[in-house]
Image (cartoon, rainbow, N blue to C red):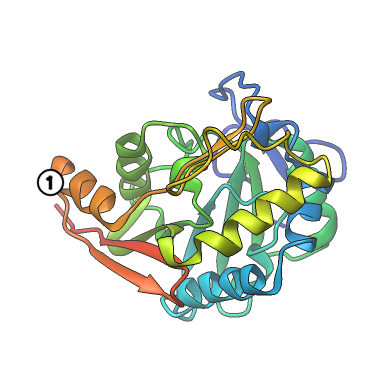
Amino acid sequence: MKDCPANTNRAKDSCICASSNICTMSEYYASKLSSENLKRCYAIAPQRIQRYLKAEIQHVLSYVRQNATVLELGCGYGRVLSRMTETCSSVVGIDLSRSSLVMANHLLGDTKSILLAQMNAVDLSFADNSFDIVFCIQNGISAFKVEPSDLILEACRVAKPNGICLFSSYSPKIWHSRLEWFILQSEAGLIGEMDWDLTGNGIIVCKDGFKATTFTEHDFVELLDGLGLQGNIVEVDSSSVFCEIIVRGS
């Protein structure tokens, strides 16, 4: 695995880099739903959700070209990264959870084309125009709990001219399977007890404060219009809503 281009401190036997601009956050995905627990969430996913997860990865891969440089925002334990190495010359995954990155480093082994870095997705330590593809899937635009416009602008900043930024959220067509999945997570103790008074209309809420929202096609269009950006909104597998932005050169 390669050295991080940012100024970093290297952990022993690891390519995980620690950025000095990390926020101190106690969010679910940086603590409770990280590493082994996050992996377990995907392991117990119903068959329809498994299909949705595979379809998301395949859609990202459809944009990957030989020798592309790729950045994943919110890489977790490396579930998606290994698929990128088949054609990419450089794959970078960033996440706030160090425990997830440690697991990713272990699972990915000695894959030399992959770099893992602990970093905030809205304050990346990469130079402008660094990547051919920047992607944030599996509803990261909602799950990160950051300002969506900041997330998109930062992704576009580090993308090369004519590069592409990909963001995805859930399609309303998969609501029942998605709800089933979160019920299974709740029953397994991975998230809190479901709050049925507040759960519905695309929003899942637990009594311990966990809240999962989504971005609709309208939300993406409104966000792009507000930023003065052009993009395509497409539905994939009747399960994902993708926002695809081609980054224009200055």
The image shows a total of numbered marks equal to: 1
- Decide if residue 2 is in sight here: no
Q: At numbered mark 1, what does the secondary structure look like: helix, strand or loop?
A: loop
Is 218 in front, or is 28?
218
**What residue sits 46% from the left and 58% below the top?**
170
**What residue sits 60% from the left and 64% below the top?**
177
**What residue sits 46% from the left and 75% below the top?**
59
Location of residue 78 in the rendering, given as x and y in whole percent from the top left corner: 70, 57
Location of residue 87 in the rendering, given as x and y in whole percent from the top left corner: 56, 79
Displayed quadrant of residue 151:
top left
| Residue 35 vertical position relative to residue 98 in the rendered view, above or below | below
Q: Residues within 10 Å of mark 1 (few under 14, many from 20)?
A: few
The N terminus: image quadrant: bottom right
Can you name the residue that lies furthest to the front here?
197
Displayed quadrant of residue 178:
bottom right
Q: Which residue is mark 1?
A: 228
Location of residue 159 in the rendering, given as x and y in whole percent from the top left corner: 35, 54
**What residue sits 42% from the left and 74% below the top?**
236
Location of residue 148 in the rendering, given as x and y in whole percent from the top left corner: 35, 38
Give amino acid for label 1.
Answer: Gly
In the drawing, does residue 44 fall left or right of residue 27?
A: right
